[in-house]
Amino acid sequence: MGRWAGVVSVVVAALALPASAAARPLPQMPVRTKPPPVKEESPSAAPGYLAWVQNTRSHPHLFNVYAQHDGRTRYRVNPVGTQAGLGTGIDGTTLVYTQRHRGGFNIRMFDLATKHRFAPPAGVNTPRIEDEPTVSGDWLLFHRSHGGATPGQRVILRDLRSGETRVLASVDGRAALLEAGQVNGDWAVFTKSVDGTRFNVWRYRISTRTLVEVPNPRDRVHSSAAVNPFGTVYFEESGRRCGANATVEIYPVGGPMITAGTLRPGIDMFHPFLFANATDSYLFAKLHCVGGATDIFESNFA
């Protein structure tokens, strides 16, 4: 269930899933599993590459970003003396991630081929918190927040080449919530709640500047959104409590909405990521509501 769960710690043009999918468990397989207290979350991938955020048994409260090429030995991305924050994203060989250093949270970039670290263009990082980044082509999607007497949050889309900045959503107040989902091709998605009680997913088309709310006729919690290059949105629908009747829903452009499968009671998910690898490969962090254990899983949809 997006940020509140995280803090506790190709291609489909026309989708045809059987109507009985609503009653079936979500098809999934573990990507990397470790026994507690190791937690793995914030996954992203591209052909040949995988990145994620993980703690260790010896330091369960410290998280780092790791990457892996073609299933070989993992390596740490963020430098010594820093930690990882929420979110990773990969496009080609470009990885974006959140780095925590001396109490600040900012976005960093990393070339997976050369293993070179570098900063995004000026204006992306500020003294405020920047996290939950994903990247597609020249576009960077991320979340920015600030505390104080009048806390506020923004979901921001930034053209890394031209410097153009678009604020896709903004909320103010301690009860409000925004979660940057994913930018993929001409599309971006995010989760928004203005009062902490109603949560909805929104889809944005970059070329037309069109913003559409994903239908929520049952007024349930919609969160943890990802999108494929055709604008098909994958997200979680659930009750108000963690792990309450959670399902993964699929909403292509023009509809209809389709239930891909259910999660077991007491299981939730956050920070999913979609990448094209002959099918829609859907990565997500599975959260055990009791105990807070997290591991990365993958579902594939043809």
Image: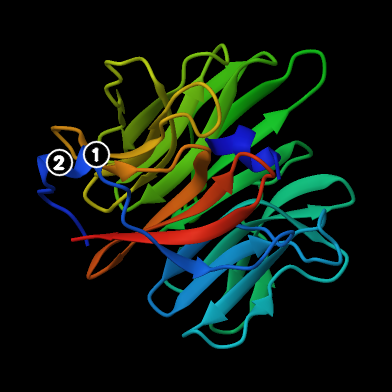
Disc 2: which residue: 20
Residue 187 lies left or right of residue 43; in this view the side is left
Residue 197 seen in the figure: yes
Residue at (19% x, 40% y) in the render? 252
Residue 76 lies left or right of residue 178; in this view the side is right
Task: State the quadrant of the C terminus.
Answer: bottom left
Residue 250: image quadrant is top left
Residue 215: image quadrant is top left
Question: Badge 1: few (under 14), some or many (20 or more) residues near its Cα, within 10 Å?
Answer: few
Query: At numbered mark 1, what does the secondary structure look like: helix, strand or loop?
Result: helix
Residue 214 lies left or right of residue 14; in this view the side is right
Look at label 1 and name its amino acid: Ala
Using the image, tell me which numbered label, if any, was put on residue 35.
Answer: none
Note whether 43 is above or below 206 in the view shown: below
The front one of 35 and 148 is: 35
Disc 1: which residue: 23
Look at label 2 and name its amino acid: Ser
Coordinates of residue 160 in the picture (x, y in percent): 51, 54
Residue at (31% x, 32% y) in the render? 209
The front one of 51 and 284 is: 284
Coordinates of residue 12 in the picture (x, y in percent): 17, 54
Q: Disc 2 and disc 1: Cα gap in Å?
A: 6 Å
